[in-house]
Image: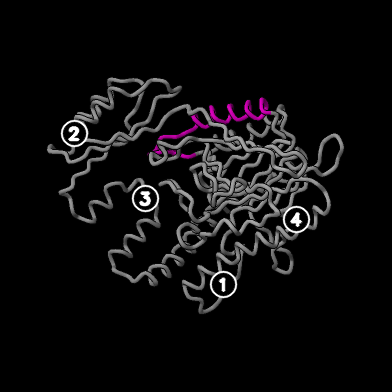
């Protein structure tokens, strides 16, 4: 049995107002061919299929067209979980229909009539098409929001809340491991878990935003019980092994989603099993249809680097230029760089940043790149400027995230 693990597609994403539709389509077509060529049996998409709760129509078309194209490949089953960027209701809407095509979707955690988490809703038994027998069990754990994990406690401090969130995430995985172990019984079949969260010690990029980022939902690798032979993670865009455990991995995003990822190799993980034994894991590199480049140096260095950009990309490269310690006016430098860039059809300069060490105004240094920051970044900067204590900032941050969550939920309705 072969399983392919991917995540963080972010269909519909825009980079500095430039859409990624063409890049995504090229990579999705490559993924279809790879699944067929590698004779993959099961595809897992570990969250953040879309970049926003209300994705553009073309992104929805790409998603459903991809699922349709899968029907012509070797893939027998697809398991999709919701990420923090996804709307659970949008993902779940066609789930009953797609289940008939062996496409299983878990957009969010589910509670039963008593208000308790229904762990069985996250357990998917995959049957062999020929024998009809279960040949794999998936603990399809989606992104776990605070309300999915626990009820709020009156008088709870910020520190207590952080600890309770972490404890609740660990308990969720332990409960589902116990449940799936009972379902498995004596069957010699692989048990796979998914997750969309931040595991401590992992490497972040600038494009990752999450209500559980940082100290709040950060968990250790040991929350994943040994009952899981492989843990397919999403949320972090850099492919990586977690806690030095080969069985726990982030696949990373399909394409680089910000200039901070310009050095990353983009991968999918192909995992081979023989009965319940994990035989090997192959990290297969995704051919990049376009490179994101970050060129940094003084003006002379930047011009030299622009002239030496390679031309081996299917689509024009997108370039961020960072000029250090300019002696001329910023506007003049930008004009010179854009004039140089306009002479080459192999790349486009999306962004020019001028770094002047003599600039010391905290406001100017923060607002210089406003298009790159999230609402939470702005809020935290305001807390910093107001000289709040760390504990006070953390309390306000939790409240801010609750308000943003409520607004996002209303947008999804």
Residue 150 image offset from top left, x and y in percent: 61, 68
Residues packed near mark 4 inside 10 Å, few (<14), some (14 to 19) or many (20 plus):
many
Q: Earlier in the sequence, mark 3 or mark 1?
A: 1
Question: Can the viewer see residue 49?
Answer: yes
Prevalent SS, magenta region? helix
Residue 192 image offset from top left, x and y in percent: 69, 48
Residues packed near mark 2 inside 10 Å, few (<14), some (14 to 19) or many (20 plus):
some
Question: Can the viewer see residue 90?
Answer: no
Q: Earlier in the sequence, mark 2 or mark 1?
A: 1
Residue 373 - label: 3
Circle 2 residue: 333
Residue 152 - label: 1
Circle 4 residue: 180
Q: In which quarter of the image is residue 101?
A: top right
In three-dimensional space, the C-alpha distance between marks 2 and 3, rounded to whole angstroms, equals: 24 Å
Magenta span covers which residues? Answer: 13-38
Residue at the left extreme, as displayed = 327
- The quarter of the rendered structure image containing the N terminus is top right
Does the magenta portion include 32?
yes
In three-dimensional space, the C-alpha distance between marks 2 and 1, rounded to whole angstroms, equals: 53 Å
């Amino acid at each position: 049995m072969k399983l392919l693990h991917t995540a963080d597609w972010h269909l519909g994403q825009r980079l500095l107002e430039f859409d990624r539709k063409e890049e995504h389509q090229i990579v999705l077509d490559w993924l279809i061919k790879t699944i067929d060529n590698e004779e993959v049996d099961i595809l897992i998409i570990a969250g953040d299929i879309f970049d926003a709760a209300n994705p553009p129509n073309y992104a929805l078309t790409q998603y459903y067209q991809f699922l349709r194209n899968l029907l012509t490949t070797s893939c027998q089953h697809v398991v999709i979980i919701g990420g923090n960027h996804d709307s659970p209701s949008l993902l779940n809407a066609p789930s009953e229909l797609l289940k008939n095509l062996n496409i299983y979707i878990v957009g969010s955690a589910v509670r039963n009539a008593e208000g308790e988490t229904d762990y069985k809703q996250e357990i998917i038994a995959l049957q062999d098409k020929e024998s009809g027998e279960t040949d794999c069990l998936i603990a399809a754990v989606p992104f776990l929001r605070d309300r999915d994990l626990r009820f709020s406690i009156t008088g709870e401090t910020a520190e207590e809340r952080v600890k309770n969130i972490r404890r609740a995430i660990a308990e969720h995985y332990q409960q589902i491991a116990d449940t799936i172990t009972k379902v498995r019984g004596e069957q010699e079949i692989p048990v796979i878990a998914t997750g969309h969260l931040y595991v401590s010690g992992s490497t972040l990029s600038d494009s990752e935003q999450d209500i559980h980022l940082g100290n709040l939902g950060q968990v250790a690798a040991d929350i994943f019980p040994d009952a899981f032979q492989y843990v397919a993670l999403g949320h972090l865009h850099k492919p990586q092994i977690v806690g030095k455990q080969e069985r726990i991995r982030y696949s990373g995003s399909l394409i680089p989603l910000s200039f901070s990822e310009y050095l990353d190799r983009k991968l999918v993980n192909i995992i081979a099993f023989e009965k319940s034994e994990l035989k090997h894991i192959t990290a297969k590199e995704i051919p990049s249809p376009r490179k994101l480049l970050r060129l940094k140096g003084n003006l002379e260095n930047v011009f030299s680097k622009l002239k030496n950009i390679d031309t081996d990309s299917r689509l024009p490269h997108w370039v961020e230029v960072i000029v250090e310690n300019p002696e001329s006016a910023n506007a003049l430098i930008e004009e010179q760089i854009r004039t140089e860039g306009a002479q080459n059809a192999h790349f486009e300069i999306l962004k020019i940043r001028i770094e002047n060490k003599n600039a010391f105004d905290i406001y100017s240094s923060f607002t210089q790149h406003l298009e790159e920051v999230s609402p939470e970044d702005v809020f935290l900067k305001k807390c910093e400027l107001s000289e709040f204590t760390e504990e006070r900032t953390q309390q306000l941050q939790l409240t801010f995230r609750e308000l943003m969550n409520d607004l996002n939920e209303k947008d999804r309705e």
